[in-house]
Amino acid sequence: MTEQQELPERESMEFDVVIVGAGPAGLAAAIRLKQVSPELSVVVLEKGAEVGVHILSGAVVDPIGIDRLLPGWRDEPDHPFKTEVTDDQFLFLGPAGSVRLPNFLMPPLMNNHGNYVVSLGNVCRWLATQAEALGVEIYPGFAATEVLYNDEGAVIGVATGDMGIERNGEPGPNFARGMELLGKYTLIGEGVRGSLAKQLIAKYKLDAGCDVPKFGIGLKELWEVKPENHKPGLVQHSFGWPLGMKTGGGSFLYHLEDNLVAVGFVVHLNYKNPYLYPFEEFQRFKTHPAIRGTFEGGKRLSYGARAITEGGYQSVPKLSFPGG
């Protein structure tokens, strides 16, 4: 951008609450706000082209949160909680075999009976319809790129990115300024390592007195498997091979409905082995004798990777700041 070119002012919209991120947290917050105060104006920004597109499929969900947020959800025919956990397995993998660990040795957090195997993307899409029915405005395709502050240094909203910027950084023929979304309160629900969240943590020193954050990379695939290899409701967690004893991580298989299986592999990002490549280790994991039979004759439908938090409660920064 040259000094001679001044950007036009952004258009702005005002709301009571601006929420960044249409994930489970952002949508649940929007729903609860409208339940408590229906007169509030609430907007949710989602960077993806549609709600749920950035949420990788496959999760085990404890329904306690949904029971409290939407108590009548079981009576709705389109809810996404179709597959209840029927079998909960924990495996330690060696190079050529596996050992199943007794469930009673696992902490209560790892007891998944009564939970549901779901596509988290479908959960978000369903929550979005619930939010919109209450009057929440949801804007997919709007990526918040800037935090806006008042003269006192408090957050007053966010701005979306400018469109039509050329490779040289100059405005192109289709240039359009982003939009300011101003709110009395701003809630940041970007997910792990969100760009705005990192700015806010640094500006307000929200992590002062907290432990160092720890992250992992989670690789996931969604498969359609042969019916004879499908066990609806099976939740299988494993650790060990191919990761060494000095590398943190684990793996899982979640059997959903319709012959779908979500498989994932997690590696903590503090690993020291310079020859470890998480994607290649993930592919090796699927060749293990206890794993590969599930996928023989199947078809991979989608895949992706996301950062995940591993630090625990002691690494959680302060969750409020001036204006949000």
Image: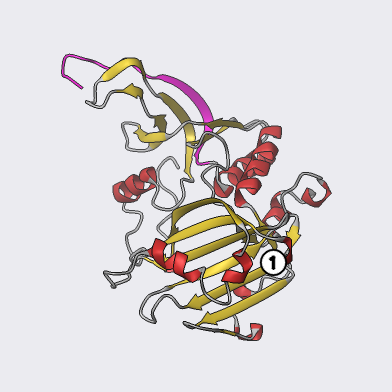
Between 19 and 242, the residue placed more toward the observer is: 242
Instruction: Report if residue 2 lies within the magenta region.
Output: yes
In the image, taking residue 168 as reference, residue 17 lies left or right, namely right
- Say which quarter of the image contains residue 268: bottom left
Q: Quadrant of the N terminus?
A: top left
Q: Quadrant of residue 172?
A: top left
Q: Is residue 107 visible?
A: no
Spot occupied by residue 112 in the image (x, y as percentages of width and height): 67, 70
209 on left or right of 94? left
Total numbered circles: 1
Q: Which residues are magenta?
A: 1-21
Q: Residue at x 75, y 55 (%)?
A: 82
Report helix, strand or loop for mark 1. helix
Is residue 44 one of those drawn in magenta?
Answer: no
Residue 12 higher or lower than 202, as above or below: above
The residue under the point 64% across, 41% down is 125
Q: Quadrant of the C terminus?
A: top left
Front residue of 223 and 144: 223
Q: Residue furthest right?
A: 75
Q: Is residue 203 among what the camera can see?
A: yes
Q: Nearer the viewer, residue 321 or 265?
A: 265
